[in-house]
Image (cartoon, helix red, strand yellow):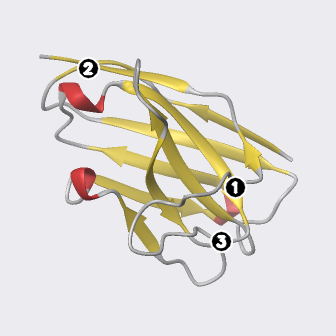
Amino acid sequence: VQLQASGGGLVQAGGSLRLSCATSGLSLDYYSIGWFRQAPGKEREGVSCISGGVPGTYYLDSVKGRFTISRDIAKSTVYLQMNGLKPEDTAVYYCAADSTCGWYGGPPLYEYEYWGQGTLVTVSS
């Protein structure tokens, strides 16, 4: 199983980026894909997740209405469209896979099974 995140970069506040998570060795029909981020000096936090099978989506409260997660099963790729970016969104973003999203009232509290490398998002003020 491999996951490869891409699409990060430097953007001004209010701008947009689209992150991609290309997967191989697993099926998006069965695996949930989550996006996590870790800012300097802070703990990693769950940002969003799209569940396998019939897709449900989950978002961190601070990104609701600004970020949208989606998937293209034919391309085995999950996307995170990020609009209205703020300096506090600056972080390394990771995608990860697990059998469920695990969002029960908030971001998951356990470690997902498979992880990709991170992609850096920097939002300037």
Left-right relation of 1 to 32: right
Question: What mark, if any, has residue 97 been given in the picture?
Answer: 1
Residue 59 occupies quadrant: bottom left
Tell me the residue at 69%/62% (across/down).
Answer: 74
Question: What mark, if any, has residue 11 been given in the picture?
Answer: 2
Amino acid found under the numbered disc labelled 3: Thr
Left-right relation of 57 to 87: right
Crowd band around label 1 with a 10 angstrom C-alpha radius: few (<14), some (14–19), many (20+): many
Mark 1 vs 2, N-terminal side: 2
Mark 3 vs 2, N-terminal side: 2
Which dot, 1 or 2, sits closer to the camera?
1
Q: Is residue 118 above or below residue 50?
A: above
Question: What mark, if any, has residue 100 been given in the picture?
Answer: 3
Left-right relation of 81 to 114: left
The span from disc 3 to disc 2 (Cα, nearest Å) is 32 Å
Q: Position of residue 31 (x, y in %)?
A: 72, 67
Q: Is residue 93 above or below residue 120?
A: below
Q: Secondary structure at mark 1?
A: strand
Tell me the residue at 73%/69% (across/down).
Answer: 99
Crowd band around label 2 with a 10 angstrom C-alpha radius: few (<14), some (14–19), many (20+): some
Amino acid found under the numbered disc labelled 1: Ala
